[in-house]
Structure formats: structure tokens, C-alpha cells
Amino acid sequence: MKSYFSSLACASGSFLLGACGIVSADSASDTVTIDYKAIVGTCESKNIILMICDGCGYNQIAAADLYENGTLHSQPYDLFPVILPMSTWSLSSYVYDPEAASKDPKWVLKGPTDSGASATAFATGTKTTNGKIGVDKNNAPLLNQTEKATSVGKSTGVVSTMPFSHATPAGFVAHNASRNNYEEIARNMVYDSKTDVIIGAGHPLYDNDGKLTASPQYNYVGGQDTWNQLVSGTAKNKEGSWTLLERKNSFDSLAAGLSPLPKRLIGVAQAYYTLQEERSNGNAGTDTVGQVPFNTSVPELSTMSTVALRILSQDTAGFFLMIEGGAIDGAGHSNFIARNIEEKMDFNKAVRTVIAWIEKNGGWKNNLLVITGDHETGYLTGPQGIYQTGEDSFDVDYDLVNNGKGKIPGYSWNTGNHTNQLVPLFAKGSCAEALPATAINHDPVRGNYTDNAAVGKTLLQILTKKNGK
């Protein structure tokens, strides 16, 4: 057992402001001391690819590593030149306090971010309150990465294993006071944005097992009228008409270069809420990986990513692309370790696909790849989890137990919610060297750490024309 926490020094502390050095999230300025123009300098990146593993902390990565390879740190991104911890707090939560987190294993359970606020931080470089998409705490729209990229002549896209109007992909395209306004958000993405590629789940005619449903639900695609326009080819955004892709074989054909590339694409895979994670008949407590047969009517994240890369790379000026493995979060909420590992392995495969594409298309001098999580979900730890060591003190059995390749490691879940703990970030390629300069705070366990809003501001600066002009 490896413990990361000593005895509890400050048991609670009030929300946002309190003893223990907690800072008000509403008034905190985590990025004001960073000169983004200076740290980015004259570096340029033709293509920026941000891959977000929703709900992934260190142990979600470890669990998939141990199952897939029988050893830790076995992914290609473990060899990236930039590896940093990152905080994810929102204006509805506690500012990450490294001392409090290191002394009390329960501290990170209090007031975490949600995916909407974290996506907004990545997309705009600005912290907001939970539940919002692309707007500040007062609901004012914020310039996001896709809008910035479009303004400098680049193409843009978002890809997810969740509905395309869900929090993370929506956060990079839409602006809404509530992440739950799915129809409104979807219409914003379809009709009002200049985005070139939008791919996800959310198909109104299929259920979570990829089968036709007798009760269509059009909420994730903007309502029935919007869906009908997408199907008929009459739906347009500011850049022109959309091509709709639905069938797995159509995704496969485009990815393999067997079909003509459209200029603009909306892909809605034939599953409702997730591609795989919500398929029925699973048992969170006893299932092993793949025990319930996978849906066969939907593409993998790697295939959807390839489709997006092929379409966007038609633009000689470059592109910005966000790719999300979104259902890892759902498996964390349901404490379903087998599904968590399945989704993380699917994400890892997509990472390998993106790396292979980069190496064949301009290499690392023309491409920047950033891989990270938007927050941790489930507080995944070793088998003993959080345990009491005294009247007012606790410790945690943090490390998973390696049971060998192909076997689920020893583990414990400690919540069904998000946590406020640091998550890892990996980066390689042009301008990646700017990111360590944003790690201006220090954690006694993880070392110097960056923040999701700082990452967002850095990417926006990279998208700015050379020398900020």
C-alpha cells in the first residue's frame, strides 16, 4: 500500500472560504501572473489536437494500463516530453488547495467542477460556474477555440463518444447558460456555428444497444425538425450545408479513404446516449471487460477521429480538433470498473491512431497534441479506499493492485461523483514547451501543476497569429 495522505489537519473548512487556506473560487485569479504571449513566443502550430478523457484521473489511466498491458506507464503518451498535473476547479467549487488535499483524503470530494465548466475553461481560458457552456458566470458568451481558429483561417471540429450536444463537445462550439438545454445547444451548433466537423452519439432513432427504438428522442440533435433537415440535407450553418453520416460502414469507408470527403460533416452514430458504455445487461460489481457483447452498429472513437482528421486536413491552413472519450465519466459515476477500462482502452486506441496520423502528416513540428482529463470521477483507489486512522484522521490506500494482464486490478470506488483532485496532462509537438511555464503552483505529491483555464489560454494564444498580430 502506498499512502499519499497524512493525518487530517483541518477537518472541514467552509465552502469556498474557510480555515485551511481555501480561496474563493469566485474571486481567485489563477492565471493573471502568466504572460501567455511571452511563453508562447513565436512558436506556431499548424494543427492543434486536444484529446479529453472525461472523468480520467491517474488511476483511471492506471486501471486500463494494468488490464491491457500488465504494467503501469505503458502508453505512448507516457513518453511525451511534457507531462504535468493539472487542476480543474470551477467557480462553483473550491480552488484546488494542495496542502489541504495532501493532508485530508476526503478534501477532494468537496465541490468539484462539472464537465460544462471544465470544457468552458479549456475552450475559452476562462473559469465559469458549473452547468454553463461557453459563457462566463454572468452568462456572457466567451470566445472559444473553434471560433478563434476559424478567425485565423483554420478548420475546426469536435468528436465525442457522447451526444454531440453534450457538455464537452458543446463547450467548444456553443454558448448557453445551461448544459441541459440540449435541443437549444444542438441547434446552436448546427445553425449558428462555423464548425466544420461535429461527430458524436445521440441518434434519435436508436437506443443504447444500437437498436431501433419505438420511442424516438430528438433532444440531443436539436429536435425533430432539425433532425429532418439534417437527414434531407437542408440544414446549414454559417459555412454552408452539412453532410450527415449515420451508419458504421459509412464511417469505416470515409476513414479508410474509400469514399469522397465532404467539406462539412455531422456524424451521428446509431446509438442514443453513448456508443458502448450504456449498453444493457451489465453488472457493475461482477462484470469483466467485454463480458457484455459490444454494440456492433457503431464506430470506434479511433474511426471517428480518423474521419475528422481526414476532413479537416483538407484545409491547408490547418485546424483545431477536440476529441473526447466521454463515457469514461459515466462508468465512474456508476462505479463500473469493467466499463471504465473498456472506455479508457477505446480512448487509448484513438490516441494511437492520432499519433500515427501526426507522424504521417507533417510530424510533430507541425502538430500539437495535448491529452488530459476534464476532472476525475469516482475517486478510484486501491482496495481499502479511504479509511479512518484516528478520531479525526483518515488515510487512503491509493495504488491499484496489479492482478496481471487481462485481469481487473484490485480497486475501490469512494464516490459516485466528480472529485477536485489533480489530473494528468500529456503534450507533444509544436508549442508544447509553452505548457510547463503555466505550472506556477506546487503540489507536495504531484509537483508543479497547471490549470485547465491556463491550458485554454495557452491554446488560444497559439491560435493567435505569429507575435500576437
Image (tube, rainbow, N blue to C red):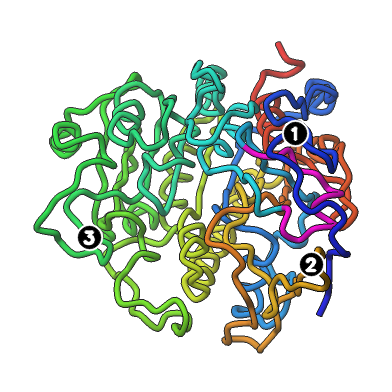
Callout 3, which amino acid? Asp
Callout 2, which amino acid? Phe
Q: 351 or 202: which is nearer to us? A: 202
Which of the numbered marks, if any, corresponds to residue 195? none
3 or 1: mark nearer the eye: 1
Determine the CA span between mark 1 and mark 2: 23 Å
Task: From the viewer's perspective, tell me whether residue 96 is left or right of residue 276.
Answer: right
Q: Residue at 49% across / 38% down in the picture?
A: 313
The reply to whether residue 67 is visible in this rendering is yes
Q: Residues within 10 Å of mark 3 (few under 14, many from 20)?
A: many
Q: Residues within 10 Å of mark 2 (few under 14, many from 20)?
A: many
Q: Position of residue 434 (x, y in %)?
A: 80, 35
Callout 1, which amino acid? Leu
Residue 105 magenta? yes
In the rendered image, the quadrant that contains the C terminus is top right
Regarding mark 2 in the picture, which secondary structure is present there?
Answer: strand
The reply to whether residue 81 is visible in this rendering is no
Which of the numbered marks, if any, corresponds to residue 394? 2
Determine the CA span between mark 3 and mark 2: 43 Å
- Where, by quadrant of the figure, is residue 95 drawn? top right
Residue ID for mark 3? 207
Q: Position of residue 335 (x, y in %)?
A: 51, 69
Asked if the residues shown at circle 3 and circle 2 are in contact, with their CB atoms under 8 angstroms apart, the answer is no
Regarding mark 3 in the picture, which secondary structure is present there?
Answer: loop
Q: Position of residue 91 (x, y in %)?
A: 63, 31
